[in-house]
Image (cartoon, helix red, strand yellow):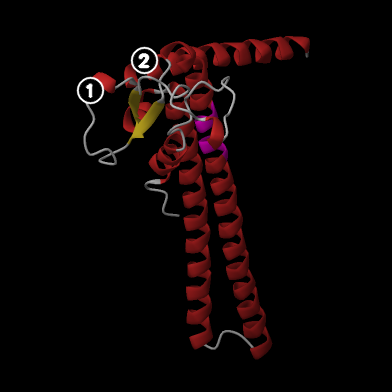
Amino acid sequence: MNKKNIFRTVAVAAVATLAMTSCDKSAPKMDAKSQTAEQAPSELKIAFVEVDSIMTQYSFCKEYSEILQKKGTNIQNTLEAKQRQLQQAAANFQQKLQQNAYTREQAEGIQASLQKQSADLEALNQRLSNEFAAESEKYGNALRDSIQHFLAKYNKDKKYSIILSKSGDNLLYADKAYDITGEVIAGLNKAYKKTAAKAEDKKDKAAAKK
């Protein structure tokens, strides 16, 4: 399985959906006819967040990336081990077949068994790949939701009109004065620490009841 760039891709996709979602959600939506000059904001406030920094500094992102990496490595090791076993069995069969070590019925039986093992391996590959993709999607959704939830509260005071996600050179130029990455990461980690502490406390209480 080629999962070399899966973790960065998932996070970038999740954070990229944040563009233009950080405006005050409590404000009522207005139709086109009601959007007059008087109702438009007098000042357009824009900020941006570095995706790569979230990847490396947001605790939830780092921890879940490690989980996905371990899972991906385990899947790859499992499939490679079974592939080697199948190749060795096929090589042994071919060698003995050339030595006339089997009757026709035996050879046909072993060949059918090898074909079944090959089909089973392909099915296993597909199942594990689907499980990994589902886990990656679950992580991406959780990452996106956590960032959106934080920004919704963060922007109640900041009142930014737009918060952009910056990844690589998707923004050709951005003044560092509009960079709120540090504030966002600090806030995300603070919120995640509280959530993790509550989850651990709940786990301890559940264990104590047993």
Left or right: residue 121 versus residue 21 is right
Left or right: residue 173 versus residue 205 is left
The percent coordinates of residue 65 (x first, y second) are 45, 34
Question: How many numbered dots are placed on residues in this image?
Answer: 2
Reading the image, the residue beneath label 2 is: 183
Tell me where residue 207 sits by quadrant. top right
Callout 1 crowding tier (Cα within 10 Å): few <14, some 14–19, many ≥20: few
Q: Is residue 60 magenta?
A: no
Decide which of 104, 180 is in the foreground and name it: 180
Decide which of 200, 52 is in the foreground and name it: 52
Q: Disc 2 residue type?
A: Glu
The percent coordinates of residue 94 (x first, y second) are 50, 81
Q: Is residue 33 above or below residue 9?
A: above
Residue positioned 45% across, 29% down in the render: 61
The percent coordinates of residue 168 (x first, y second) are 27, 39
> Residues in magenta?
138-145
Tell me where residue 46 sits by quadrant. top left
Reading the image, the residue beneath label 1 is: 176
